[in-house]
Amino acid sequence: MLKIRLQGTTNDLKWFIKMLSRDKRFVINTPSDPQDIKGSKKYKRVYTEVFRTKEEFQRYNDSSEPEIVKYYYGSGTTYGYGYPKRKKK
C-alpha cells in the first residue's frame, strides 16, 4: 500500500485520479477532498491510498470493495472521482 499526496490544480487532480482509477493494475481508495495549500489559491492537495490488488485493499480496510464516488452535474457526464465541485467564496 502507498499513501500518496497529490498536488496541482483541481482539474489536474481530477484527471490524474480518474486515470489511476481506470488503470486495472491499481486499486485506489476514496481520495480526500481538495485542500488549500498555504500561499496559493490556484493549487490544491489531495490524499489517497493506492493498493496493488483487491486482496491487499481488503486486508487494510473493512469494506470488501473500494468505493468509487462519482458526482453527477446534470449534463449527462460524470466529472471527477472522489470529491465534489467547490463553490467559490
Image (spheres, rainbow, N blue to C red):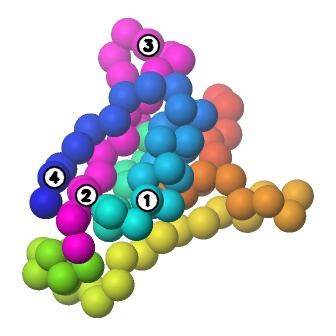
Q: Residue furthest bottom?
A: 64
Q: Give the distance between the C-alpha atoms of the residues marked 4 and 1, in whole angstroms.
A: 16 Å
Q: Amino acid at mark 3?
A: Ser
Q: Which residues are magenta?
A: 35-53
Crowd band around label 1 with a 10 angstrom C-alpha radius: few (<14), some (14–19), many (20+) = few
Q: Amino acid at mark 1?
A: Asp
Q: Quadrant of the N terminus?
A: bottom left
Q: Is residue 75 left or right of residue 33?
A: right
- Tell me: residue 59, above or below residue 10: below
Upstream in the sequence, badge 4 or badge 3?
A: 4
Using the image, tell me which numbered label, if any, was put on residue 40: 3
The quarter of the picture where residue 57 lies is bottom left
Is disc 4 in contact with disc 2, using a CB cutoff of under 8 Å?
yes
Front tag of 4 and 1: 1
Kindly state the secondary structure of the residue where label 3 is placed: strand
Upstream in the sequence, badge 4 or badge 1?
A: 4
Q: Which residue is mark 1?
A: 23
The quarter of the picture where residue 4 lies is top left
Q: Which residue is mark 4?
A: 2
Residue 24 position in % (x across, y down) = 40, 66
Upstream in the sequence, badge 4 or badge 2?
A: 4
Q: Amino acid at mark 4?
A: Leu
Kindly state the secondary structure of the residue where label 4 is placed: strand
Residue at figure coordinates x 50%, y 61% from the top left: 22
Q: Is residue 2 magenta?
A: no
Upstream in the sequence, badge 2 or badge 1?
A: 1
Q: Which residue is mark 2?
A: 50
The quarter of the picture where residue 67 lies is bottom left
Q: Main SS type for the magenta part?
A: strand
Count numbered badges in the picture.
4
Q: Is residue 43 magenta?
A: yes
Q: Amino acid at mark 2?
A: Val
